[in-house]
Every structure is written in structure tokens, then in C-alpha cells.
Image (cartoon, rainbow, N blue to C red):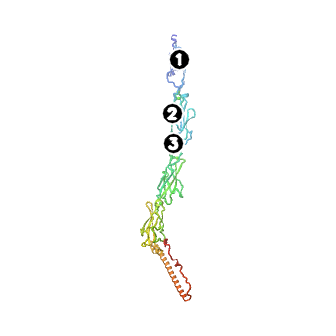
Amino acid sequence: MGSNGEIRYSFSQSSQSVSNLFKIDSVTGEIAVNGQLDFENLKKYEFYAEATDSGGLKDTSKVYFEVTDINDNAPIISVISFSNPVPENSDPETVIAMLNVKDLDSGKNGIVKCYIPQSLPFKIKSTTPNYFSLVTDALLDREIISEYNITIIATDEGSPSFSSKKTLNLNISDINDNAPVFQRHSNIAYVIENNLPGISVLTVRAHDKDSGNNARVSYFLEDILVNGVSASTVMSVNAESGEIIAVRSFDYEQTKEFNIRVKAQDGGNPPLSSNVSIKIIIQDQNDNAPQVLYPVQSGGSVVAEIVPRSADVGYLVTKVVAVDVDSGQNAWLSYKLQKATDRALFEVGLQNGEIRTVRQVTDKDAVKQRLTVVVEDNGQPSRSATVNVNVALADSFPEVLSEFTDFTHDKEYNDKLTFYLVLALAVVSFLFIVSIIAILSVKCYRWRRERMFYKSEANLPVIPYYPQLYADVGDRNITARVQL
Ligand code: CA
Ligand code: CA
Ligand code: CA
Ligand code: CA
Ligand code: CA
Ligand code: CA
């Protein structure tokens, strides 16, 4: 062969550009990779190799390489669109974001799947290759979760596979889907009567689970009728604080309780509202003194209770009857003897107001007895009334008459009484004189008749005559009340 048979290999002049990627053994002609191949950059290489002998003769041959892909690229997620925030009332399948995922590899190495690893009310839908949409998968509720961090993972199908992730921060915007809710469904407020107008009675509070204006609660008094009048003339409500204020003073004796309704309304559009019923209970104050119904104290007459001198111990003289328009302790009455002509003769029942004798009446006791009974309620402080009770210890009516001429202290009244007494005495005297005259007339008539009989017919019968008025005079029921 000789030196002409020695062959050397090289890249041809036109293919020097590949010499940084490939090398060729000049003796053996073996071609090896000398640099970094990248399928994603260039998939095929074509160049020429030369064989040259020592005599300078050469030949060229085309060399052809194909680069095979390996999975050396992770998917790349890019967000095309993102609706943030999304309203809480969005329907399922509402699109939140559009994503594009690229993988530079080929075949399975470049086929990408997207998913959400957490359990969230969202899902990924594939629309066209490499395009994905993030959609809602359930109903949202801002009042439960107001913000989501949604991690999206894209994985290729290479082996081993590459994956990458992207996290979207999604806010849920509020919709006015909650009405204000009162802390208590029913309320009772107590107001002591005779209150000053403008006092605070109760504060109601309602909570709204929404946010912002949708949760801003205002309070209003519902215009219902309260005992026939508009509620607003009785109570008012502070729109911001929910404080309920009494507009006027209450009288327990007129109104014991009533109901009002308060509405809580949010600032949403349209607004939502709810209402609550409030029972206002007026509490009694001891603002009324007892009133004595019996014995009657006014008017132009003196009332006296007549007690026979023969009355036993414990004889019921009379009963003081009183009422108190307050209630409870404020109307719980007790009766006490405040003054008496003779304290040892009478007692008053503490609870029932019954006046009874406590000892036997004696001849020494004055006919005229005057008792002052005080009727007191049990309020704090207590109020009282007094009543005068006139008692006559007498067995007959004239005895009473003679004594009861000065039972009143009122001058005018006394004069009136004196007039009636004089009138009564005049009538009685007149009747007495008429009776005497009548009797004398009868006696005289009979005497004359007798004398005439003796003179003429001695045995004629005698018919007695009594005037009607005289025959009626007798005892009266002395235990009865006497009114003059
Ligand atoms: Ca890949
Ligand atoms: Ca690759
Ligand atoms: Ca609301
Ligand atoms: Ca809401
Ligand atoms: Ca009262
Ligand atoms: Ca009272």
C-alpha cells in the first residue's frame, strides 16, 4: 500500500461549523459528540466528512444525525386572564382564569396535564391543547371562606416526569345575601312609671354576616299601633345604636305593658331586613295614696255608727273600706287606729279595717266616740290616708241626737247641721204637743160624755180614741246607721 495508502479523515471545508459539536478521529474516522446537543434547538444534523490519502486524493461522504428527545423541559404555566375577585354568588362552571401551558419537549415528554392538588371548589378544564381554564366547581360563600390560594400543577408525561406549579390568590367579593340577625329574638324591657321622657329603655343589636355596606345595620321603629296610638308617639329608636328611648312618661295605672317592633336593615342594594318584637313592661311606683270608700268623708252629712251599750266584746262597729290603684306592695293596705276618744275601747283590724270593741261598754263611756283610722300602703315610701269614724254609744235615737251636734269642725257644715237639728226638734216638739192636745181633747170629750150619760142613759158603751201619730211612737232599731 505504501504511504499513498494512509487515509486521514476530517470534516469537509463546508461543514466546519459542526466541529464544536462533533469530532472526527482522523485515523479511524470515528465521529463522536463533542458538545451539547439540544433536541429542542436542532433535531437533525447533516454535514460532510472527507477521507484524504497521502497522495492528496479525497472523497466526501454525507453524514446524517437525528437527535432524539429526552424529557428535559418542565411545563411552563402562563396566565392569560384572571378574574379577581369573583362574586360569591357565581354559578358553578364560572371561568375564573385562562391558562396556557407550554412544554418544549416532544411526544409524551411534552404532553401536559393540569390539576389542583388541594380539595377546593375549583377545577381545571382543558379547552384546546395546552389551554386550560380554571372554573368554579361548587357554590361559593364569602361568609365562610373569603380568599383562596389556588395552586395549579402542570405535569408532563415524560419518564421521569417534570412538573411545575403556579399559585393564584383569589378573593371572593361580597354579595348582600344575609339579612341582619338580632342577637335575641324577643326582648323584654322594664320601665318604671313616671319616667322622664327620653330615657333609654333597652338597646337592641343585630349582626350582619356580610361585609361593608352590606353589613351596615340601621334600626327603625315599625309603625304599629300601640294601645291605639302610633308607636312613634310612645317610643323611638336610635338608627345607629339601636337604643330604644321612651318618648313620654308612662303611667302604670293606665298602661301596664305594650309591644313594639324594631326593624334592622342593612345597607345593601337591595337592602335586607329582619325585625324583633320588644315587650315594654311598665313597673308600678307608689304614686297613689289609698282612697277611703267607706265611711264617706265628704258631703253635707255626718255618719255615725251606733253601738248599743249592751254590745259584747268584739262587736263589729263598722269596716273601713279603702282601695289603692297601685299594685302589689304599693296597694297592700294596712289599717291602724291613729287617734281615739278612748283607745282602750276600740281596735282596728290591721288587714281588714274592721273596727271592733275590745271591752264591754260601760255607763261611764261617753256617747260620742271619735276614731281616726290611718290607711297605709306598703310602698317605699308608703302613702296613707286618714278617715274619721264617728261612733255613738247609745241605746236610743234621741240619745244620739242630743250628742251629735258638734261632730264636724267645718263651720258652714256645722251651721247646716244645727239648722236640721233645730228643725227636727221642732217637728218632734210639734208632734208631741199635738199628741198632748189630742189626748187632752179625748179625755175632755169622754168626761163630758160620761157626765151626759149619767144625766140621761147610764149604760151606753165607751169607744176610746187615740191619734194615729201617737200610736206610732216607739223604739227604733238602734244598731242602724243614723243619718242626719
Ligand atoms: Ca417535558
Ligand atoms: Ca427535550
Ligand atoms: Ca347583609
Ligand atoms: Ca355575603
Ligand atoms: Ca302606681
Ligand atoms: Ca299606693
Does the residue at mark 1 contact the one at mark 2 (Cβ under 8 Å)?
Answer: no
Of labels 2 and 3, earlier in sequence is 3
Q: Residues within 10 Å of mark 3 (few under 14, many from 20)?
A: few
Quarter occupied by residue 464:
bottom right
Residue 177, how many percent across, how many down? 54, 45
| Front in this rendered view, residue 179 or 456 | 456
Residue 274, how many percent across, how many down? 53, 50
Real-space CA distance between mark 2 and mark 3, rounded to the nearest whole angstrom: 26 Å
Judged by depth in the image, the label closer to the viewer, 3 or 1, is 3
Q: What secondary structure is marked by label 2?
A: strand
| Residue position for label 2 | 165
The three-letter code of the residue at mark 3 reads Ile
Residue 76, how many percent across, how many down? 52, 32
Of labels 3 and 1, earlier in sequence is 1
Q: Residue at coordinates 55% horizontally, 28% vertically from top-left? A: 108
Residue 144's tag is 3
Q: Is residue 101 above or below residue 322?
A: above
| Residue position for label 1 | 50
Q: Residue at coordinates 52% horizontally, 20% vertically from top-left? A: 15
| Front in this rendered view, residue 261 or 319 | 319
Judged by depth in the image, the label closer to the viewer, 1 or 2, is 2
Q: Residue furthest top?
A: 2
Q: Is residue 77 above or below residue 209?
A: above
